[in-house]
Image: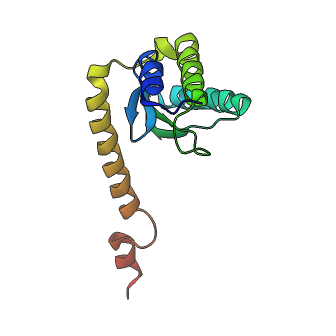
Amino acid sequence: MTNSSDDIQKHSQELAGWELKDGKIVKSFNFKSFLDSIKFVNGIADIAERQNHHPIITIVWKTVKISSISFDVGHLTERDFRLAKAIDKLYSERFEENITPVGNLQEEHRLLAEEERKEKARKRTRGPYRKSSRAGLRK
């Protein structure tokens, strides 16, 4: 089990793009489509089940964020680094060609926020309770 700061630093340096945050190792992966991000998460689920070690997975449109810590012992262990390496391998073998250039990520988040605002506005104007439909019901 990895517990010492030296071991954690050594293992972290072996992982490209993974960061130490709040006692966890964390990495974000970007994709060209939402469906690609879901396929990636499904691949991670298969790996996690085989290793019996399950990360925290957050999906925001075309970005998948992975955080890992060994919850049973409350700190990073060899299992976290082994899982991270397997996730990186999955990404490089099946998804690397589907990445979104980093420069476009801010634009994508802006577009996502705009889409969410539009959807909320559409929901407010749907249904039998909108003003235009109520006006016709009053006598």
Which of 68 and 109 lies nearest the eye of the viewer?
A: 68
**Residue 24: x, y in percent?**
45, 37
For the N terminus, the quadrant is top right
**Residue in the image at 46% along x and 27% along y:** 8
Which of 129 and 87 lies nearest the eye of the viewer?
A: 87
- The part of the image, by quadrant, that contains residue 16 is top left
**Residue 63: x, y in percent?**
43, 32
**Residue 20: x, y in percent?**
39, 32
Which of 18 and 37 lies nearest the eye of the viewer?
A: 18
Is residue 54 toward the left or the right of residue 139 in the image?
right
Q: Is residue 62 in view from this perspective? A: no
**Residue 138: x, y in percent?**
38, 85
- The part of the image, by quadrant, that contains residue 94 is top right
For the C terminus, the quadrant is bottom left
Q: Is residue 134 above or below residue 44?
A: below
Q: How is the image coloured?
A: rainbow
Q: Is residue 128 above or below residue 98?
A: below
Is residue 35 toward the left or the right of residue 21 in the image?
right
Give the total of numbered labels: 0
Q: Is residue 123 above or below residue 17?
A: below
Q: Is residue 138 in view from this perspective? A: yes
Q: Name the outermost residue toward the bottom.
A: 139
Is residue 112 toward the left or the right of residue 51 in the image?
left
**Residue in the image at 45% along x and 71% along y:** 128
Which of 77 and 86 lies nearest the eye of the viewer?
A: 77
**Residue in the image at 47% along x and 16% along y:** 98
